[in-house]
Amino acid sequence: MTISIPQIKPRVLVVGSINMDLVVRSARLPVPGETLIGDGLSEIPGGKGANQAVGAARLGADVTLIGRVGDDGFGDTLRSSLGVEGVRLDGVERTQNCCSGVAIISVERSGQNCITVVPGANGRLTPDDVRKHAQAVASADVLLLQLEVPIETVLTAIELARTNNVLTILDPAPAVNDYPPELLCVDVVCPNESEAASMTGVEITSTESAYRAAEKLQQRGARQVVITLGDKGAVFRDASGNSGHLAPFTVTAIDTTAAGDAFAAALAIRLAEGKSLQEAGRFACAAGAVAASREGAQPGMPSRADVHALLS
């Protein structure tokens, strides 16, 4: 297969979290009250915002990140690792007297994981931080958002993007107890099945129930919807009401921590390049599968060649 590389890089602006992932590996995940002996500990740059920024950069985008790190050693490491990946750091502020965000991730040998996040500086990303970079928002082709930073900051970014006719994509993770209605006033929302169920009240047990959830998300404001279903692929519903199933790719899962972030980054890239939701979703499924077959959040993000190799 010929690898298509765009002549002009799509401009992706990410507003989101920047974490240091402390990854603990063990044969299985502990149950409450249990102590297990782990196989190892790794410090890996992560955070949904940073992961998606790196994912988009590796897929060929010109990426700017708006976020915050602390004034600790993790902050220095996180900024450095993003810079190495080519992510623009003009919008990454250092927060005084505050720790950087940390995620404690337990991963079992099957690839399944559970995560505890300490927001740190991410919790201090304000609407004014976004407004300060309003020109970067206005000049982007696509704005990519998640929910590991304050909701009011996300809403400000959505408002600025809509004012400037910038494509908006929301990855509504992690799930929150209360979703403001205006949060779904985006061009694309891409939850996983548990997040979609939380947002709609529809228990997702099949592709048909996923289609119902997608329709409800559209009724609540989202222009287009993609719901990821893990090893069952994904379903989509476009602006015309057309729905479809995106078949999964068969890979050996090693670490699913950032598969959703790779998916969101790839979806953003292909939509910014003018592809249909179905085409972009297929590409995104492949990107998520490649990420799941690798260790680590940012280290596991695929290149465009990696994705095309799986698609072929």
Image (cartoon, rainbow, N blue to C red):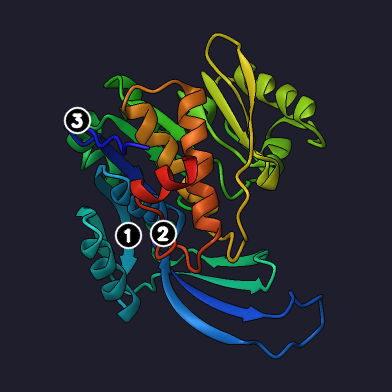
Mark-to-mark CA distance, 3 and 2: 24 Å
Looking at the rendering, which quadrant does residue 193 occupy? top right
Q: Amino acid at mark 2?
A: Asn
* Label 2 element class: helix
Answer with left or right where residue 68 lies relative to residue 47.
left
Looking at the rendering, which quadrant does residue 115 occupy? bottom right
Answer with left or right where residue 84 lies relative to residue 242.
left
Q: Which mark is residue 139?
A: 3
How many numbered marks, from 0 up? 3
* Label 3 element class: loop
Q: Quadrant of the N terminus?
A: top left
* Label 1 element class: strand
The mark nearer the N terminus, 3 or 2, is 2
Q: Amino acid at mark 1?
A: Arg
Q: Are marks 1 and 2 in contact (CB under 8 Å)?
A: yes
Q: Which mark is residue 122?
A: 2
Viewer can see residue 151: no
Locate residue 92, reporting x and y percent.
25, 57
Looking at the rendering, which quadrant does residue 237 occupy? top right
Q: Are marks 1 and 3 in contact (CB under 8 Å)?
A: no
What's the residue at 28%, 70% (across, down)?
96
Which residue was labeled with disc 1?
Answer: 68
Q: Amino acid at mark 3?
A: Ser
